[in-house]
Amino acid sequence: ASKYRPFAPVRLADRTWPDAVLTRPPVWCSVDLRDGNQALIEPMDIPRKLRMFQTLVQIGFKEIEVGFPSASQVEFDFVRKLIDEDLIPRDVTIQVLTQAREPLIRRTFEALQGARRVIVHLYNATAPVMRKVVLGLDEDGIVGLATSQARLFNELAAQQPGTEWVFQYSPEMFSGTELTFAKRVVDAVMDVWQPTPQRKCIVNLPSTVEHSTPNIFADMIEWMHRNLARRDSLVLSVHPHNDRGTGTAAGEFAVMAGADRLEGCLFGNGERTGNLDLVNVALNLYSQGVHPGLDFSDIDEIRRTVEHCNQLPVHPRHPYVGELVYTSFSGSHQDAIKKAFAARKDSDLWDMPYLPLDPKDLGRSYEAVIRVNSQSGKGGISYLLESEYGLELPRRLQIEFSQVVQAVMDASGKELSAREIHELFTREYGLA
Ligand code: KIV
Ligand code: ZN
């Protein structure tokens, strides 16, 4: 017998999701500077934080969780720096996180003095294991904790009327919480905050640990979407983690199921196996014809900055950005790509085998698309000679020369660059 509990699927009255495909982008919120940062071996110092913030702004994020100001002096000082030095563009809203504990909330509001507009994000755990084992509170106790701290938000915000306050609440471990209890806590917090359609609050539902398959998480989101009180006064946000490796799918399904907003990190940084990968979701949308409203036109520069700020490498096979993802090693793939490039000369449509997206759109070059190694065929070799050196080989010569290249690669076991292939060609046919 297994020591793990099976999933408990949510039974909905009808099985039709509000949407079966994504036709518009969600509201994006980057939590790189908070969830991403807290999971780093070496958390960012202020210069690295600032560089990450500026990169996020440049990409086009309008909501950015910049830290947990009550957690450390660096976190506090970074928020102060952004506000004091007027570094936040008018159309960008910073977000800060606080646990539902009075001294932390007071310190958080202290960090925010003079801010123009802020999302203040309150959280407390709601799942049974956290209630029983960690907090020692029953359900009423959790509701009491959340609502008393929500009231403190009202009180402290009223003392700083010059700031436009947006309140966000997360039932931490939502993915492991009974739905009726999650609804009870969220509704109770919203009773305190009294959102309206003109002054919405954000309800953020995290899969703090990704417990279930993404369809089940999405069913939970749909249930909340259908059952929360004051739905038209709420922005329904989700915050998927990636413990099962399905954070991207969980986020996409959640939006199909009724969520308005996604929290995540660039390239999926974050606690343990990371947060939802914002780049992945955004470029999935882009490659199905929906502009995400985020700019990844120089994705390598973004990757380099993120690697510098996080001091963590991005995997060479990471979707859309990895060093190898526009490289075709197989001869049949190379041949198909070559034919499709030739066929698309007069067309704007990207109908390309093996390349879901035009690498040029992300600042990547076609040069890297075709490389030649012992697994390739004649297609890649003649493509490189033609595209790089203008040499159009007749078919018989293509076959003959590919055997020469193959023999060299078999002997060395190494890949050949376009330059090496050209040198070999000129040597072989006495053109040098
Ligand atoms: O994963 C999580 O539950 C969180 C919350 C604090 C929102 O990061
Ligand atoms: Zn998280």
Image (cartoon, rainbow, N blue to C red):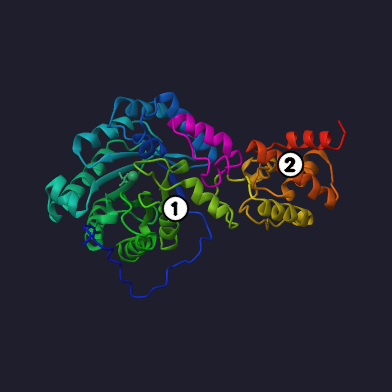
Which residue appears farthest toward the bottom when viewing the image?
A: 14
Which residue is at 25% across, 42% downward? Answer: 153
Residue 97 x, y percent position in the rendering: 31, 39
Query: Would you say 380 lies left or right of 302 here?
Result: right
Residue 123 x, y percent position in the rendering: 26, 45
Q: Is mark 1 within 8 Å of ligand 2?
A: no
Dot label at residue 405: 2
Q: Is residue 49 visible?
A: yes
Q: Main secondary structure of the magenta part?
A: loop
Pointer 2 local density, CA inside 10 Å: few below 14, some 14–19, many at least 20:
many
Asked which secondary structure carries label 1, the reply is: helix
Residue 7 x, y percent position in the rendering: 28, 63
Q: Quadrant of the N terminus?
A: bottom left
Res. 180 image quadrant: bottom left
Pointer 1 local density, CA inside 10 Å: few below 14, some 14–19, many at least 20:
many
**Mark pair 1, 2: CA separation:** 41 Å
In reply to whether residue 398 is colored magenta, the answer given is no
**Residue type of the residue flagged with mark 2:** Val
Dot label at residue 248: 1
Q: Are marks 1 and 2 in contact (CB under 8 Å)?
A: no
Q: Nearer the viewer, mark 1 or mark 2?
A: 2
**Residue type of the residue flagged with mark 1:** Thr
In reply to whether residue 309 is colored magenta, the answer given is yes
Q: Is residue 86 visible?
A: no
Ligand 1's quadrant: top left
Residue 252 x, y percent position in the rendering: 45, 57
Instruction: Pick whichever of labels 1 and 2 is earlier in the sequence.
Output: 1
Which residue is at 71% across, 43% downward? Answer: 406
Residue range (magenta): 295-324
